Amino acid sequence: MENGTHMGYLANDLARDIEIPTSTLSKWTSEFEKKSGILIKRNEKEQHIYSDRELKAFREIKNLLNNRVPFEDAITDAATMYLENESNHKDEVRLSKSELQEIIRKEVQSAIEEEREAMFKAIEVKMNEMKEWLKEVIR
């Protein structure tokens, strides 16, 4: 169900997961985007890429419809749930594996440089102390 590095789900994968035709998912997606005001991300081929939260919302739509909730109400309820859930994730940041690796690489490099500078300063202090001690011994 993943499209590689789990950046999200393609429509055919999501439709298969919740056991609906892709044409139905397309209709639900259009209505969901209208009700929630959220545009579902697309890849470079303009295919929808659904997140885990969107998968959960579409599962909820199917569940509501199975319980005879009218279509418009099911979409509205799922969009409301999605938006409430989104407000609980305002501090959430999504990074790709390569973005995270680059951040870690930079932070590690910075920490190494700071440690190296501290070590050189400590060596310089010790060398100056030794230099002063040698001057005293030689006199």
Image (cartoon, grey):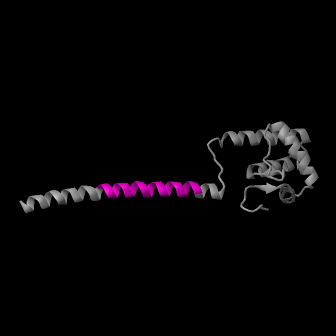
Q: In this view, does 56 lie to the left or right of 110?
A: right
- Residue 76: where, in percent of width, then height? 83, 38
Q: Main SS type for the magenta part? A: helix
- Residue 62: where, in percent of width, then height? 86, 50
Residue lying at the far left in this picture: please name it: 139
Q: In this view, does 91 lie to the left or right of 112?
A: right
- Residue 17: where, in percent of width, then height? 83, 59
Label tally: 0
Which residue is rendered at x = 91% and y = 46% of the image? 27
Nearer the observer, 12 or 18:
12
Which residue is rendered at x = 88% and y = 58% of the image? 19
Q: Is residue 85 left or right of residue 71?
A: left
- Looking at the rendering, which quadrant does residue 5 occupy? bottom right
Nearer the observer, 25 or 6:
6
Which residue is rendered at x = 59% and y = 58% of the image? 101
Nearer the observer, 22 or 126:
126
- Residue 113: where, in percent of width, then height? 43, 56
- Looking at the rendering, which quadrant does residue 97 occupy? bottom right
User: Does residue 60 show up magenta in the picture?
Assistant: no
Question: If the image is split into quadrants, where does the C terminus sit?
Answer: bottom left
Question: If the image is split into quadrants, where does the N terminus sit?
Answer: bottom right
Q: In this view, does 117 lie to the left or right of 135?
A: right
Nearer the observer, 95 or 12:
95
**Magenta part of the protein: which range?**
102-121
Which residue is rendered at x = 61% and y = 43% of the image? 91
